[in-house]
Image: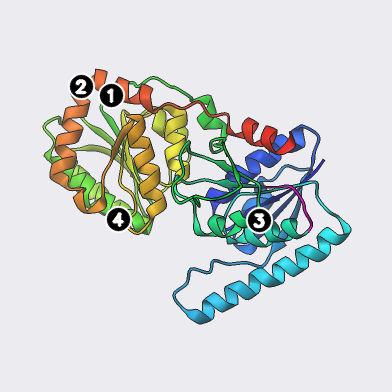
Amino acid sequence: MKIWIATGGTGGHVFPALSVADELVKRGHRVIISSDGRVSKMVKDGKPAKAKTVFVWASGVGAKSRIKQVIALMKIGFSALALSLRFMFSRPDRLVAFGGYASVPAVFVAHLWKIPTYLHEQNAAIGRANKFALRWVKTLMTSFDTVNGLPKQTNVKVVYTGLPVRSDFLDAANAPLKHENKILVTGGSLGAQVLDDVVPVAIREMKNKKIFVTHQTRPENVAKLQRFYAEHKIHANVLSFIRDMADAVINADIVIGRSGASTVIELETIGCPAILVPLAINPDQAANAESYAKLGGGFAIEQNKFSAKWLSSTLDELLDNPSRLDKMAAKSYVQNQAVKKIVETVTE
């Protein structure tokens, strides 16, 4: 079977697509992956050797500038025309889209050519590109068992598959907590500045002083945070990049971070207590964090309520109650069979 995988925009869309592509190739299917130029290297480096790649011209249409919006729509239209001509001579049997505006032209053309099309939503609230493309698909696969923002009247079949994660997270699934008073802070982006502002102060104010912190931050903040932790005699490892994130999560008793879909699903896959602070302007992250909190695996707290006072008392309470942390870890664990479920849904 010839299967077209449409992805692009960010790693959050690309990595799940590559995991599915790899499994499809292993099962003997012919795979073509389309993406935009922003992630071309990521796709080339990570794709299965037997998979082919096609690059489309696309960008998001959410810019405030009307001119940029028009240009973005023209790119999508041009890509749709190019793909339509390609499908005329070499039509795939299935098309699987992993969201982002780079997947929209492929979904539209597949609809024109009556190709069975499957759309995957990574967040607990449907994104704008997927919501727009939903009119042309028959099956929506989801990362979370409940997705906000779906149209009330739709003929689309919704299948809960989960979100593919890297193999190192699968290998660490349901790992027991070590209870070594270790806290992992996953920042590293401009939007995570609030973590750098609040977490160090909160740890300084904690009653429990036998704490070890692994704090990921932006490169320009590393030296500043190192000085802060050293001045207050807090054992900390501050770095701008964590090479083995699965290992870092395994060794943490609690994680503090944002709530992108990949982050939340990785925490669920391992089973780790967490304090999640959704990006204030991102409803997708708020929905993801709320979904995790409902499991009982941790806290979803709005950024304007995320204070050093609240965090220090919460961390003290949790680390002083190992049994409560164990219960949170157990509740947060969700078996991840996303790749298998997606592949079987697409090829059935």
Residue position marked by numbered label 1 in the rendering: 325
- Residue positioned 76% across, 60% down in the render: 112
- Residue 110 % position (x, y): 74, 56
Question: Along the line of sight, which residue is nearer the eye, 127 or 256?
Answer: 127
Name the residue located 53 percent from the left edge and 69 percent from the top edge: 61
The region drawn magenta spans 113-117
Whether residue 231 can be seen here: no
Helix, strand or loop under label 1: helix
Which type of secondary structure does the marked residue at label 3 adopt? helix
Residue 107 x/y as whole percent? 68, 56
> Which mark, by number, is residue 193?
4
Name the residue type under label 2. Answer: Asn
Disc 4 residue type (three-letter): Gln
Task: Give the number of the mark in front: 1 or 4.
Answer: 1
Q: Amino acid at mark 1?
A: Leu
Query: Marks 2 and 1, Cα distance to the nearest angstrom?
Result: 7 Å
Which residue is identified by label 2? 321
Q: Earlier in the sequence, mark 1 or mark 4?
A: 4
Among the two numbered marks 3 and 4 on one chain, the one whose residue lies closer to the N terminus: 3
Tag of residue 245: none
Amino acid type, mark 3 = Trp
Residue denoted by label 3: 136
Instruction: Give SS at disc 4.
Output: helix
Please identify, in this view, whether the residue under mark 3 or under mark 1 is nearer the observer.
Answer: 3
Question: Alpha-carbon distance for marks 4 and 2?
Answer: 29 Å
Indicate whether 215 appears above or below 88.
Answer: above
Give the dominant element type of the magenta stretch: helix, strand or loop: loop
Q: Please, which residue is most extreme toward the bottom here?
A: 67
267 to the left or right of 277: right
**Which residue is pictured at 31% across the width and 21% down the height?**
327
